[in-house]
Image (tube, grey):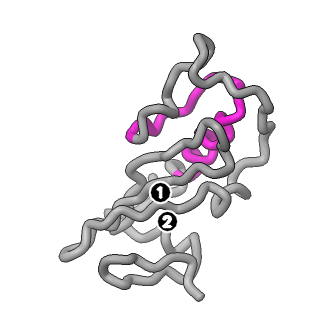
Amino acid sequence: MPFRKCPQCDCRWPGREAFLADPAVALSGCQVDTDNPRGSALVFDHKVAGCGTTIAIPVRHFADLYSGPVHKVNWAPSAKCPRKCFDPKNLDSCPAQCASAFVREILQSVLRITATKRP
C-alpha cells in the first residue's frame, strides 16, 4: 500500500520520503484545526501536466518530525494569537506557545525537507 495516491492522475508514492522528494509535489498550505490541532492537515499541490490537484495529508503522518513540547493552552483566537493558523496559505512559524504551535513546527520541518528538492 503506497503512502499516498493522487486522486486525479493516480500517481503513487511508496513512502513519505518519496512524496516529499518529488519535485512535482509542492507544499502549499496548512489547514489547522484550532479546536483539535491533531486533526490538522498539510496541503500539497501536485504540479504535473494534466493534473494540478490538491492533496491534504493529516499532520499525524508527519508527527515524528517534531519532538518538542505540545502545549495544552489554546490561544486561538485570543489577543495572544498572531492568527497565522487562520490563513491556510501562511507557511510561517508562529511564536505563540499554544496547542496549535506543534503543527506550525511540523510545517517548518516539511518546508526544510522540501527546500532540498532540485528543480
Relative horizontal placement of residue 70, taking residue 108 as reference (left or right): right
- Residue 39, image x, y percentages: 63, 51
| In magenta segment, residue 107 | yes
Relative horizontal placement of residue 56, taking residue 94 as reference (left or right): left
Residue 114 numbered mark, or none: 1
**Amino acid bearing label 2:** Leu
Q: Report the residue at 76% width, 26% height from top.
A: 73
The answer to whether marks 2 and 1 mark residues whose Cβ atoms lie closer than 8 Å is: yes
| In magenta segment, residue 95 | yes
Residue 81 numbered mark, or none: none
State the residue lying farthest toward the front: 35
- Residue 88, image x, y percentages: 42, 40
| Placement of the C terminus among the 4 image quadrants | bottom left
**Amino acid bearing label 1:** Thr
Q: Report the residue at 58% width, 11% height from top.
A: 79
User: Where is 29 relative to 20, above or below?
Assistant: above
